[in-house]
Amino acid sequence: MEEYTVALDFLPQGRPDDRNFRKTPIVLGIGEDEFKLFELIPRQNIQITVGEKIYIGANPDLRTKIVSVKRRISEKELTNAALNELPAVLEQIVGQHEERFLDFFNRAQPINMRMHSLELLPGLGNKTMWLVLEERKKRPFKSFADLTERVKALHNPQKMIADRIIQELGDRNEKYKMFVSK
């Protein structure tokens, strides 16, 4: 279960395609641990901004902005505004949890004889993968800055990871899920 979600869009009048007479405000959010997408019901008279971290965990005393999780949704159910915000929000989450994602670069293993899990990151090819593997043999990467300094061919690892998460969200049948929960 996700503890926190980051707001991707706030619809104070509810979804435009909702056929109910009395429309319920909706928040679209993405969980920061398993990257599950949610439709949330906010408390009345609450303002929520895009990129805001919101508690949705089990402790009702900490739920100051959200009444309940309405349902889990797919990427196809996101609004255009939410889809536009998704890359920036994901880069923000990856940056805030740098140690967790840096650990991926430090510990990633081969998937099979022909493919390494590092190669699943968009923009990271075979040559760059070998550079990462050689550098991490010397010593583990300490930060994204250290990673990009030691592996000159690798630019913006936060964006690479965010792009991979978007790829995994968009394809429910993705064979190799590295970051997104099923």
Image (cartoon, grey):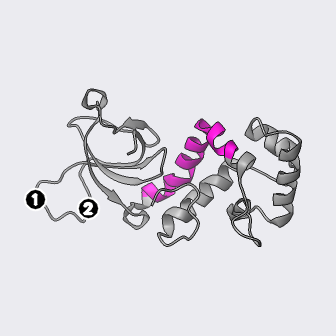
Q: Label 1: how many residues lie within 10 Å, few (<14), some (14-19) or many (20+)?
A: few
The residue labelled by disc 1 is: 21
**Quadrant placement of the C terminus:** bottom left
Circle 2 is placed at which residue position? 16
Q: Say if the magenta span includes residue 94.
A: yes
Task: Name the side, left or right, on which 41 lies relative to 2.
Answer: left
Q: Quick one: 120 or 38, which is closer to the camera?
A: 120
Quadrant hosting residue 120: bottom right
Is 64 within the magenta? Answer: no
Outermost top residue: 61
Q: Residue at x 56, y 62 (%)?
A: 177
Give the image location of residue 66, x and y in percent: 28, 38
Q: Residue at x 79, y 65 (%)?
A: 125
Question: Quick one: 66 or 114, which is closer to the camera?
Answer: 114
Q: Residue 50's x, y, as percent?
A: 43, 43
The type of residue carrying mark 1 is Phe
Q: With 31 as the anchor, is 23 left or right in this view?
A: left
Q: Position of residue 28 (x, y in %)?
A: 36, 51
> Which x, y percent locates residue 83?
47, 59
Q: Secondary structure of the magenta portion, mostly?
A: helix
Towards the viewer: 105 or 92:
105
Residue 3 vs residue 42: left or right? right
| Residue at 16%, 65% in the rendered image | 19
Bounds of the magenta segment: 81-103
- In the rendered structure, which disc, 1 or 2, sits on the residue that comes first in sequence? 2
The kind of secondary structure element at disc 1 is loop
**Mark 1 and mark 2: Cα distance apart in space:** 11 Å
| Quadrant containing the N terminus in the rendered view | top left
| Label 2, residues with CA under 10 Å away: few <14, some 14-19, many ≥20 | few
